[in-house]
Amino acid sequence: MNLNINNDSVTEIISAERLHVRIRELGSEISRDYAEIATPLVVIGVLKGAFIVLADLVRTITIPCTIDFLHASSYGSEKVSSGTVTIRHKITSIQNRHVLLVEDIIDSGLTMQRITGDLLQMNPASMKIFTLLDKPEARKLPVDIAYTGFVVPDRFIVGYGIDFNEQYRELSSIGIINQ
Ligand code: 5GP
């Protein structure tokens, strides 16, 4: 399906239906994997892109969890990475807690390396990474991903929380912008 929004043409690559099915599967897997933990799972979303996937994911997880967010930005207004990652967070203590980091896309791996470096200093009991989308072709640094929604090509993605110049986050499916 092609959408023409403003001056961009967006081609859908993952429908809302497929997103929901896959997120339900991963929610069940996460609930099984953490079934034995003694304290609620700490789910931390990376803003802004992960806000929709986190909201959908936590409603499929059947074990107790707490929710927090941190803010990371690596892209400016253009479709290219600036190479520097800015992280802002004021998360509650994660010491001795099991943490699940929820990201929208892992691309070069720079953002995840910065975030995990920061969070590991807070001595969590464990930390795993969930990403809705993985772009392995663009990887510059290795990332140990525990849960992946979909592998996507090295194209510019929008929708389902993910923006271009702050637009398209509200689309219920995932698309690529045709240039
Ligand atoms: P990395 O640091 O792994 O290169 O990039 C991670 C972040 O870059 C993601 O959280 C996301 O915000 C942004 N990003 C990576 N690829 C894309 C893309 O195709 N579209 C958009 N809108 N953002 C992307």
Image (cartoon, rainbow, N blue to C red):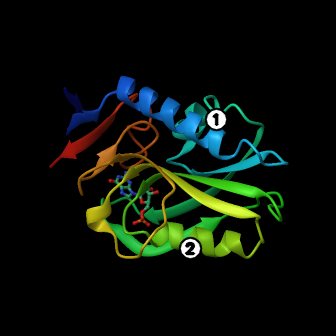
Q: Earlier in the sequence, mark 1 or mark 2?
A: 1
State the SS at label 1: helix
Q: Which residue is mark 2?
A: 114
Picture quadrant of residue 77: bottom left
Q: Nearer the viewer, mark 1 or mark 2?
A: 1
Q: Is the residue indicated by label 1 positioned so its CB lies within 8 Å of ligand 1?
A: no
> Residue 4, percent across and down?
20, 30
> Residue 122, percent across and down?
77, 71
Which is more toward the observer, 48 or 50? 50
Residue at 58% in and 34% down: 28
Residue at 56% in and 39% down: 29
Quadrant of the displayed image that contains ligand 1: bottom left
Residue at 56% in and 61% down: 72
Q: Amino acid at mark 2?
A: Arg
Q: Amino acid at mark 1?
A: Val
State the SS at label 2: helix
Q: Which residue is mark 1?
A: 58
Q: Is the residue indicated by label 2 positioned so its CB lies within 8 Å of ligand 1?
A: yes
